[in-house]
Amino acid sequence: MRFSAFHLQPQELRARQIGHLVVDSAVDRPWSQYFCCLLYGNTGYVQKYPVATKRVLRAILKATDLCASQPERVARQLFDDGAAESYDRLLEVLRELPYDRWREYDPEDTMRFYALRLHEAKLIRSTPNKIIAEGTDWRFFNELKRELKV
């Protein structure tokens, strides 16, 4: 697994006192009230391999919980695997991101929020409701949310 250098750039720039923070989507509203990332699957694959799909999602959610509960362990593993040059920067990223809040967010509300922004900017033609109705399936996520209760 490679930890993207993109995630470390803000910390590197901040450490060198370059630039100014305008929006922090992990903290600033309304962005902080929604998922920042999205997982999607090919409809045909998900329908053909539902067990594999759910296993992948379960692994991602468990890894997310591990990042929240043991950031030092995760940073050490990533650093030891050569994913980044700085253990301290990895740890900073893991501590700053709200990994522990995935159970609180509503994925449908998140889709609606971002789809509306894209629709308003005329980057997409479909309405948020159409996108949600025709392109989302929260079944696995909701099942795993119940299964992985803390």
Image (tube, rainbow, N blue to C red):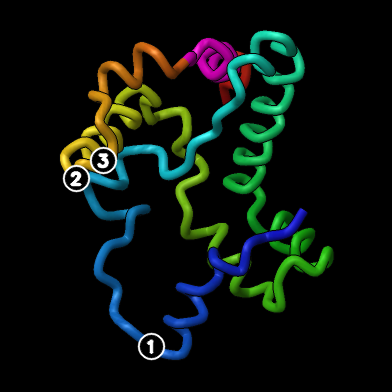
Q: Work out whether mark 1 precedes mark 3 in sequence or the reverse, and give the earlier one.
A: 1
- Above-or-below relation of 49 to 29: above
Task: Give SS at disc 2.
Answer: loop
| Vertical placement of residue 37 versus 93, above or below | above
* Disc 3 target residue: 118
Q: Residue at x 63, y 62 (%)?
A: 4
Where disc 3 sits, the SS reads: helix
Q: What residue is drawn where x is 46% and y is 48%?
A: 98
The residue singled out by tag 1 in the image is 18
Q: Nearer the viewer, residue 2 or 61?
A: 2
Magenta-drawn segment: 137-146
Does residue 83 sit above or below 43 in this rendering?
A: below
Residue at x 31%, y 46% (from the top left corner): 32
For the residue pair 78 and 112, the one nearer the viewer reads as 112
Q: Secondary structure at mark 1?
A: loop
Amino acid type at image mark 3: Leu
**Residue 40 percent across, percent down from the top left:** 55, 29
